[in-house]
Image (spheres, coloured by chain):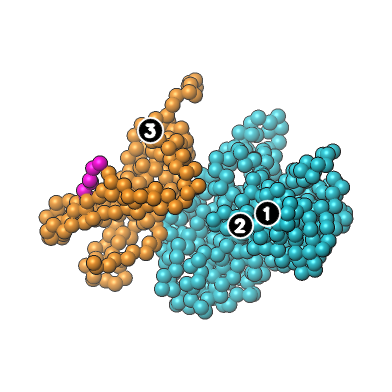
């Protein structure tokens, strides 16, 4: 068994940022990665996906985008290359092709067992990502057997799907992007939309992410929101990494021929049953968007250079069909595929410590799980941007400082 | 532009502090949040019957109220009944309106919005060919329900719309009507 001060699990943006922060503080560590650097970006994303955030916003500790197109959006090769370059520049001690089997407590240390041998360490950083598994409702088991079920983790492109109709469940970024792409490939698409967040790509001449970043929305801390549990569950924004697409919302999908209906509430005798609450979910989404834009406007009023920004604007409401369908017979042969775009969850099944709540979710305070156990990259972990590439660096820095203090080392 | 004082306390008669306290308590003991409500319906005559409502289970035990409530139902004369009480579907509509209206008051209290008047007008469309068994393609229940709120409050139109939207989001009856529920009926 090898001894080391700290073990980081995962070599994505979170693990690499943590590695850089520990290296900067001369703390010996190793980064364990089941595949290659940026493994999830390489192998668990669909072909056409681009980041929802512009290139300039992929800032990591000691590393920024220096290419020719700061306002562009990286595709999966782009983000993989970005992180590979970061790992090289940071000389991150990554052990690739190494799968963690378990993490267990041993006195006041931790044993990290892998398929390439064990490590004993004082600190473990969980940087294996927040999107390891698709969250699929229990009633998925009631789907007729001849229907193909697929999640965004397994979906690559429409060529994978059998001919015929597709039910896309979920209207966050993944759901709306897949619904549009699959419809454009000639499939009949029915989209079941529950709670969702509609925003424009551009506002007053700037990218929405510029507004979120500049006005401090992304910097908000857990103490600055009413209900952190709810804030952590907010679905991803209905956006696509493409400047030409101002709205990738339900209106755009409707115009592209996608049939939109309410949240999938259950499956009974092979019939999908949809909620009749679509109108309210659209109203909530429109109100939320307008509140966000009003905050931006208020911020802009206080700035000297407000004249450089475009004029405030408000967008028309989501057009809700008069009577969205309440059911769809899945045994009739019209629908051949169900895409579960119903969210993701981390997989900590190898973490053998009493750090989970009754729902199996990791309990943590600002990413501190237990003495010597740290999490990174979880939704709204310390700040709203914690799960973004751009947000993980500050969290990694805070953890590294905490590791210094608890190890009796002096923070520089 | 008028200058108003910020210190006025909003009072819609809802004790939101107690509700927020309950949330905290239920986080610690989720089993206490398991409630079961009852209603007992006795047939009187024809389509006329009476529900009595008193006890409910919650916070780990049974609760008896000081008063027993009754809700009567009947059918109107066009259905050859005596019209002694509202029809059950009308009671469903009134339950939806009550639930959403209570929600509006609670959310307004929580958000510091003083209400002056709130009225909800509910309509439900039914094609009675369904309940008469005339056409299997026509459902028995409402084909559409519409609720129109008239709200007078110290708030902007957007804030009032947000009250109504949030009330729907947290309403039991809105959920009951918009989502399927397994219903088990047995004979003792």
In the rendered image of this protein, does residue A299 appear above or below residue A180? above
Task: Say whether residue A340 is magenta.
Answer: no
Horizontally, residue A65 falls left or right of residue A322, namely right
* Res. A248 mark: none
Report the Cα–Cα distance between label 2 and label 3: 39 Å
From where the camera sits, is residue B20 visible? yes
Q: Pick the residue in front: A177 or B59.
A: B59
Q: Provide the residue span drawn in magenta.
A: B66-71
Q: Secondary structure at mark 3?
A: loop
Residue B77 x/y as whole percent = 13, 56
Check chain identity for marks 2 and 1: say if they share one.
Answer: yes
**Chain that is orange in the image:** B
Residue A323 x/y as whole percent = 40, 59
* Res. A52 mark: 1
Q: Earlier in the sequence, mark 2 or mark 1?
A: 1
Q: Pick the residue in front: A313 or A1.
A: A1
Horizontally, residue A239 falls left or right of residue A57, namely left
Look at mark 3 in the image and give the residue it sits on.
B12
**Chain that is cyan in the image:** A
Q: Residues within 10 Å of mark 2 (few under 14, many from 20)?
A: many
Look at mark 2 in the image and give the residue it sits on.
A173
Task: Say whether residue B67 is magenta.
Answer: yes
């Amino acid at each position: 068994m090898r001894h080391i001060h700290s073990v980081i699990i995962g070599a994505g943006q979170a693990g690499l940022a943590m590695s850089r922060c520990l290296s900067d503080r001369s703390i010996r560590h190793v980064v364990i990665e089941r595949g290659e650097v940026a493994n999830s970006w390489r192998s668990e994303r669909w072909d056409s996906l681009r980041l929802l955030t512009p290139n300039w916003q992929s800032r990591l500790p000691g590393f920024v985008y220096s290419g020719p197109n700061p306002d562009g959006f990286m595709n999966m090769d782009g983000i993989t290359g970005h992180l590979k370059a970061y790992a090289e520049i940071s000389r991150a001690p990554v052990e690739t092709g190494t799968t963690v089997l378990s993490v267990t407590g041993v006195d006041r240390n931790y044993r990290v067992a892998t398929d390439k041998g064990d490590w004993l360490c004082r600190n473990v950083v969980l940087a294996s990502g927040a999107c390891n598994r698709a969250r699929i409702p229990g009633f998925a088991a009631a789907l007729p057997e001849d229907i193909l079920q697929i999640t965004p983790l397994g979906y690559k492109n429409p060529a994978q799907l059998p001919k015929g109709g597709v039910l896309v469940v979920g209207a966050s970024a993944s759901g709306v992007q897949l619904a549009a792409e699959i419809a454009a490939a000639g499939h009949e698409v029915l989209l079941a939309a529950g709670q969702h967040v509609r925003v424009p790509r551009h506002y007053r001449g700037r990218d929405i992410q510029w507004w979120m970043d500049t006005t401090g929305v992304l910097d908000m801390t857990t103490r600055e929101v009413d209900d952190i549990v709810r804030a952590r569950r907010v679905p991803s924004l209905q956006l696509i990494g493409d400047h030409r697409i101002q709205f990738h919302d339900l209106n755009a999908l409707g115009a592209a021929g996608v049939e939109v209906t309410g949240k999938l509430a259950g499956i009974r005798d092979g019939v999908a049953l949809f909620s009749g609450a679509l109108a309210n979910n659209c109203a909530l989404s429109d109100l939320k968007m307008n509140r966000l834009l009003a905050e931006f406007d208020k911020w802009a009023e206080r700035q000297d250079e407000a004249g450089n920004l475009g004029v405030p604007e408000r967008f028309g409401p989501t057009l809700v069909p008069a009577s969205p369908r309440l059911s769809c017979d899945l045994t009739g042969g019209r629908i051949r595929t169900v895409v579960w775009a119903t969210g993701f969850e981390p997989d900590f099944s190898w973490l053998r410590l009493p750090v989970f709540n009754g729902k199996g979710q990791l309990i943590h305070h600002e990413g501190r799980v237990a003495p010597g156990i740290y999490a990174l990259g979880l939704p709204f972990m310390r700040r709203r941007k914690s799960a973004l590439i751009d947000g993980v660096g500050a969290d990694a820095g805070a953890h590294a400082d905490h590791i210094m203090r608890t190890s009796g080392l002096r923070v520089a | 532009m008028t200058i108003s004082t910020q210190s006025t306390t909003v009072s819609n008669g809802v004790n939101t502090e107690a509700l927020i306290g309950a949330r905290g308590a239920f986080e610690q003991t989720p089993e206490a949040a398991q409630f079961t409500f009852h209603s007992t319906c006795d047939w009187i005559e024809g389509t006329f019957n009476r529900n009595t409502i008193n006890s409910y289970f919650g916070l780990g035990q049974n609760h008896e109220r000081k008063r027993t409530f009754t809700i009567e139902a009947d059918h109107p004369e066009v259905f050859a009944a005596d019209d002694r009480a509202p029809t059950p579907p009308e009671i469903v509509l009134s339950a939806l309106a009550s639930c959403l209206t209570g929600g509006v008051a609670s959310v307004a209290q929580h958000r510091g919005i003083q209400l002056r008047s709130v009225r909800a007008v509910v309509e439900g469309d039914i094609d009675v060919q369904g309940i008469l068994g005339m056409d299997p393609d026509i459902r028995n229940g409402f084909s559409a329900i519409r609720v129109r709120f008239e709200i007078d409050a110290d708030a902007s139109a957007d804030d009032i719309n947000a009250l109504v939207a949030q009330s729907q989001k947290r309403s039991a009856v809105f959920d009951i009507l918009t989502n399927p529920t397994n219903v088990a009926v047995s004979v003792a």
